[in-house]
Every structure is written in structure tokens, then in C-alpha cells.
Image (cartoon, rainbow, N blue to C red):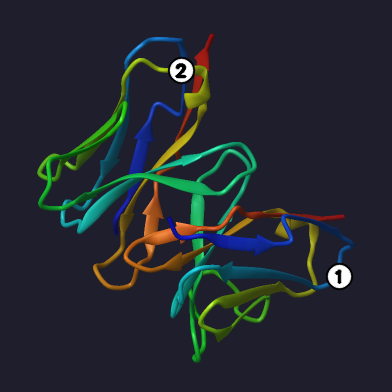
Amino acid sequence: GAVVSQHPSRVICKSGTSVKIECRSLDFQATTMFWYRQFPKQSLMLMATSNEGSKATYEQGVEKDKFLINHASLTLSTLTVTSAHPEDSSFYICSAKRETQYFGPGTRLLVL
Amino acid sequence: KQEVTQIPAALSVPEGENLVLNCSFTDSAIYNLQWFRQDPGKGLTSLLLIQSSQREQTSGRLNASLDKSSGRSTLYIAASQPGDSATYLCAVPISSNTGKLIFGQGTTLQVKP
């Protein structure tokens, strides 16, 4: 099956810093990728749709200036959490769309 | 607005039991329904995808059914094994062409040896 990778798998940062998470489709080109957020013992919540070559579209309640998304190529989307705070600590998962969605392994972010 | 609900939230069974996980959705006009498995701290693995025109899909010991009219899907796991322990999530797309998914809260399954 298709493979989607995320980097890093785990990151700890200080409050106020920015963190970049990469999502790569390893064996196919994806014009559309999705970013989800998952709090402990809760389900995935869609944050935004990342479109190659155009601006991302954000779900209601998600701050676009807080969560910067760049989809510069057909195999890479990045999510930058700017000025991270402890409440941003979460599990971030990306997916890439082909005939179905293929999910990355997730990135655990802990903001101290 | 589509809402997806999974019951129970957690389930513990002895090894070898057959079990059923439930997923319900409020808007029956779905294009497909997908079941995923998530191991602790990991991403999602797609298990089964049922198109709206299908009634069920099978893969090994897993069988997923879909009843659009009643807004329900079930995931049947036969002869459960400790390795089946994980969280199972169902999801439906918001529309046919966006790829956006709405997830249920998940059922965390523990299969005891």
C-alpha cells in the first residue's frame, strides 16, 4: 500500500517557539493532503486541507496564522505550529489522498 | 451536520471471542464508510472501505456491514486475538470529492490472553 511518512515522530519544545512538522507521500504524488489533530483518548479532528500550489483551507475554529501549512510539492506538506503553547500539545496526523486516504504515523508534540 | 458515534467506547473480551463494534451516523447520504485501526501513539491503518452501494466487505477475520437507511455500520471480528487490541475508528467523508473525513470517537478494544 501507499506510504506516508511524518517527521519528526516526537518533539518537545518550549512555549513560544515554532515547530515544523513534515508530511511526505513516499511512493505517490498527492495534490491534496489533510492535517488532523488528536487529543488523548479522543478522535481525530480535521484541521485543514493542504492543496499543492495553493493556499490551505482551514476548518472552522482553526487559526490559520497559528497553524501555517505549506504544500510546496506533490509529495510534501508542512505544518508549522507558531508560537506554540502548552494547549497546542497534541498528536498531529497527516494523510495524503490517492484513491483513498493514507495516513502518516503521527507526530507527538509536547509544549512545555 | 454529519455526526459519527461509536459505541461502546471501550471493550474488553477474552481471547477467542467473536465481537461486534458499532458505528452510527446521522446523515444517511454517505458516499462510503471506512474502518481504521489505531495502535497507541501510532497513525491509522485502513481496514475496510465500504462503498455506499455495498452492504458488506470482508478481509480475513474482519467483516464490516453497512446499513445506510438506519445509519449504521458494524465491524465484526471473529476469533479475536490479543494482537487485535487497538482502537478502532469509523469515518465517513464529508462530501464525495473533498476527501475530508469525519471520525467517530473510536472503540478501544482489549483482547485478554
- As rendered, which of A29 and B26 lies closer to the eye? A29
Viewed as shown, does residue A57 lie left or right of A110? left
- As rendered, which of A103 and B101 lies closer to the eye? A103
* Residue that label 2 marks: B81
Q: Is residue B113 above or below residue A108?
A: above
Viewed as shown, does residue A102 lie left or right of A80? left
Q: Is residue B54 above or below residue A49?
A: above
User: Where residue B54 sits in the image (x, y, percent)?
Assistant: 12, 47
- Image point (58%, 38%), residue name: A41
User: Where residue B53 sits in the image (x, y, percent)?
Assistant: 10, 52
Please tell me whether mark 1 or mark 2 is closer to you in this view: 2
User: Where residue A81 sits in the image (x, y, percent)?
Assistant: 72, 71
Can the viewer see residue A59 in this picture? no
- Image point (13%, 39%), residue name: B70
Q: Amino acid at mark 1?
A: Gly
Q: Is residue A32 above or below residue B46?
A: below
Q: Quadrant of the N terminus of chain B?
A: bottom left
Viewed as shown, does residue B12 lie left or right of A90? left
